[in-house]
Amino acid sequence: MMNNKTLSLTRKIQLKVDLPTYEERKEAIGKLYQWQNRCFKAANIIVTHLYCQEMIKEFFYLTEDIQYKLADQKKEEDGILNRSRINTTYRVIADRFKGEIPMEILSNLNRNLESSFNKNKPKYWKGERSLKNFRRDIGFPFPARCMWGFKHDPERNAFCFRLFQIPFCTYLGRDFSDKRDLLHRAVKGEVRLRTSEIKLTDTKIFWLAVFDIEQEQHALKPEVIAEASLSLEHPISVKVGSKRLNIGTKEEFLYRRLAIQAARKRALAGTVNSRGGHGRTRKLKAVEKYKNKETKYVNQRLHVYSRRLIDFCVKHQAGTLILINQEAKIEAAKENQFVLRNWNYYELIKKIEYKAKKAGIELVID
């Protein structure tokens, strides 16, 4: 019997510090901001050290008799390190920030950055990619084993847990996604929580929870091919044999988006006549209503379009999905500023890739 394949799902879940008094909550949030700051510094230090280690070969370009290897000298004859390579960067940040941040966070941060560095290393050497530069709002990772007492509280309809002795509870609000279901399954042990992140944004705390779930099982046939085309006229056009489907229209996709853009411009123009009193904040109060509104609308529409595409493929048992003639359309879009501004090609591709992988459909981009 074949084992079911698994894939990782990431869900953004708002958290609240579950402490009774304002002073206690303020102290806990201050500690979280301190951990975030130490992660910001540690991440830049780690990447710098990893790059310098790899560049040692360039420092030796005048000599030919020096033999070296980035390995522990106790285990490798030509090793130049006094410990294992992954432990070098960990010791640097652990010695610097000991007592200021849990070591589990630094250990996971170090492991994640080394994996990412090794993945992108060939592009660094070719000059096709620059080293990552981390911002102060970086999220800090933690393993699932550091979460204690993870449970569902039926009275508050929230999920509670302790992380490094700080109690948290979730705030899901009117959630129409699968977050609540995934959390219930995680409490029951039906899905596994992986290394996740805490991110602090605009005085709010978000948990970027990573779940391991089983890949969907569908009766797909690899020889059945679905051909899809992405464009602004019809966000997605797809055919499987003689079956065709146009998903969305230009008018449907652009109507609300252009209306939001126009409303924001009107609000911005009206700030000249807004009553002052609290400076910039009061002046831009009407404009702030439209902050992220366009992004959220576009994200929702692209989610609907990509979902309908994958459902169409599953319905007709298409095991392979080909996106055709995309490179030519991208080049044409670059010449038209309106299309370039309003056609979210790459975001739609990412959503299709994720949903295709989840459904077990092979995606080919032509």
Image: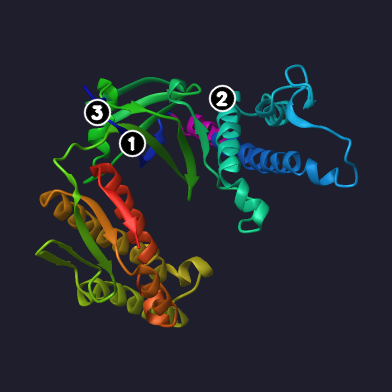
Residue 184, disc: 3
Of 66 and 136, nearer the camera is 66
Q: State the predominant SS element of the stretch in magenta.
A: helix
Of 279 and 235, nearer the camera is 235
Whether residue 156 is visible here, answered yes or no, is no
Query: Residue at point 33% right, 77% down?
Result: 263
Mark 2 or mark 3: whose residue is earlier in sequence: 2
Real-space Cα separation, disc 1 to disc 3, in angstroms: 18 Å
Q: In which quarter of the image is residue 72?
A: top right
Q: Residue 47 location, x and y as percent? A: 67, 42
Whether residue 221 is visible here, answered yes or no, is yes
Mark 1 or mark 3: whose residue is earlier in sequence: 1
Q: Which amino acid does label 2 sit on?
A: Glu
Q: Residue 215 location, x and y as percent? A: 26, 36
Q: Quadrant of residue 218?
A: top left
Residues drawn in magenta = 21-31
Q: What residue type is labelled 1?
A: Leu
Real-space Cα separation, disc 2 to disc 3, in angstroms: 26 Å
Q: Nearer the viewer, mark 1 or mark 3?
A: 1
Residue bearing the label numbered 1: 7
